Amino acid sequence: AGLGGFLTPTGLGTLVQEGKKVITVDGVDYLLEKPLKADFALILGHVVDEKGNTVYNKTTRNFNPLMATACETVVVEARSVVPIGQLDPDHVVTPHIFVDYIIKGEKL
């Protein structure tokens, strides 16, 4: 979700440290672990408005929101597409700013 990485003491002085930047904070050394990046995410939304605001159903809420924020390009397959303004803002899990493309899927 845009973080530059995190600092951890785990791996200092081991093979894990090779090629990684060591940062000292208040006299304590830490390894900089850079974030994982993905180019593309294909996610499933239960109801999506025409702008891309997404509401999930059941287990699709587990990892889809995380993937939407971590990827460069996000494609959401929508079980149902509704006009803008039809979704309750309190139920939107992934805002439209993270969605690049919407594909209307079939209802099961």
Image (spheres, rainbow, N blue to C red):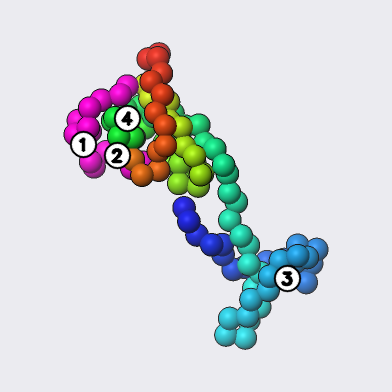
**CB atoms of marks 2 and 3 within 8 Å:** no
Residue tagged by mark 2? 92
- The residue indicated by pointer 3 is 12
Residue picked out by circle 1: 88
CA distance for labels 4 and 2:
9 Å
Q: Earlier in the sequence, mark 2 or mark 3?
A: 3
Q: Residue at x 30, y 34 (%)?
A: 51
Label 1 with label 3: CB-CB less than 8 Å:
no
Q: Amino acid at mark 4?
A: Val
**In whole angstroms, how far apart are the C-alphas of marks 1 and 2?**
7 Å
Does the image show residue 52?
A: yes
Image coords of residue 80 (percent x, y)? 32, 21
38 vs 108, nearest the viewer: 38
Examine the residues drawn in magenta and state their main secondary structure.
Answer: loop
Could you give the CA–CA distance between mark 1 and mark 3, rounded to whole angstroms? 48 Å
- Measure the C-alpha gap from mark 2 to mark 3: 41 Å
Residue at far right of view: 15
